[in-house]
Image (cartoon, helix red, strand yellow):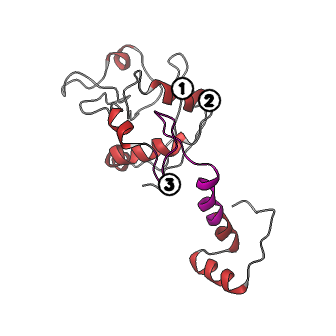
Amino acid sequence: MKKLFFRFDFSPKIKKFLTTLHNTQEQAILWIIRQLLPFLFPRHCPLCDKLLPYGSFIHEECHRELPLIHSPVCMRCGKPVSSHTQEYCYDCRAFPKSFQRGLSLFLYNKKTRPIMSAFKYQNRRGLADFFCQELCRYRLSQLRDLGADAVLFTKINIKREVIIRPLCSAAGWL
């Protein structure tokens, strides 16, 4: 764990209370910062970009508009396929991939395209929390079956599959 370069001097009562909740004073300070950040930097809805109430990641009306992917799906990339007897989609059969398994959450269409481009190209890392929450809500059993320790949100290029940047560790969510 990184050492913090600043030090807070709490009264003995507050210090005792915080250390009963957390192991060290550094963890207590990090907990306080995590509690203050949503008030300083409130979340915005990924679809309509309006402010969200504390603790939510998307408006309920906007969530209903997202096109979730349901079974049957490709066993390699997670795209929808036409029947349960079909194991792989056309792309996975025609163009071999360097990864073994992928999970898709949403269809890539006019509703999800702005969210994905904001996440990939505009560096909106706050969307990683939204994707983690949705992935755990709808794909948690599949993640557990895979024995995944972490979730990496990646941009996959068809010509060369490259992981751009890992943004969210979901070990705590599992």
Q: Earlier in the sequence, mark 1 or mark 3?
A: 3
Residue at x 19%, y 24% (from the top left corner): 83
Residue 122's mark? 2
Most common secondary structure along the magenta stretch:
loop
Label 1, label 2: how many angstroms apart (C-alpha)? 7 Å
Q: Residues within 10 Å of mark 1 (few under 14, many from 20)?
A: few
Picture coordinates of residue 68 (x, y %)? 32, 33
Mark 3 residue element? loop
Mark 1 residue element? helix
Q: Is residue 65 above or below residue 130?
A: above
Q: How many labels does the image show?
A: 3
> Is there CB contact under 8 Å for labels 1 and 2?
yes
Picture coordinates of residue 57 (x, y %)? 46, 46
Q: How crowded is mark 3: few (under 14 residues within 10 Å), some or many (20 or more)?
A: few
Which mark is in front, 1 or 3? 3
Nearest the viewer among 73 and 40 is 40
Residue at x 59%, y 81% (from the top left corner): 20
Residue 117's mark? 1
The amino acid pointed to by label 3 is Tyr
Q: Which of marks 3 and 2 is nearer the N terminus?
A: 3
Picture coordinates of residue 17 (x, y %)? 61, 82
Q: Which residue lies furthest to the bottom in this view?
A: 13
Q: Give the range drawn in magenta.
A: 31-57
Which mark is in front, 3 or 2? 3
Residue 148's mark? none
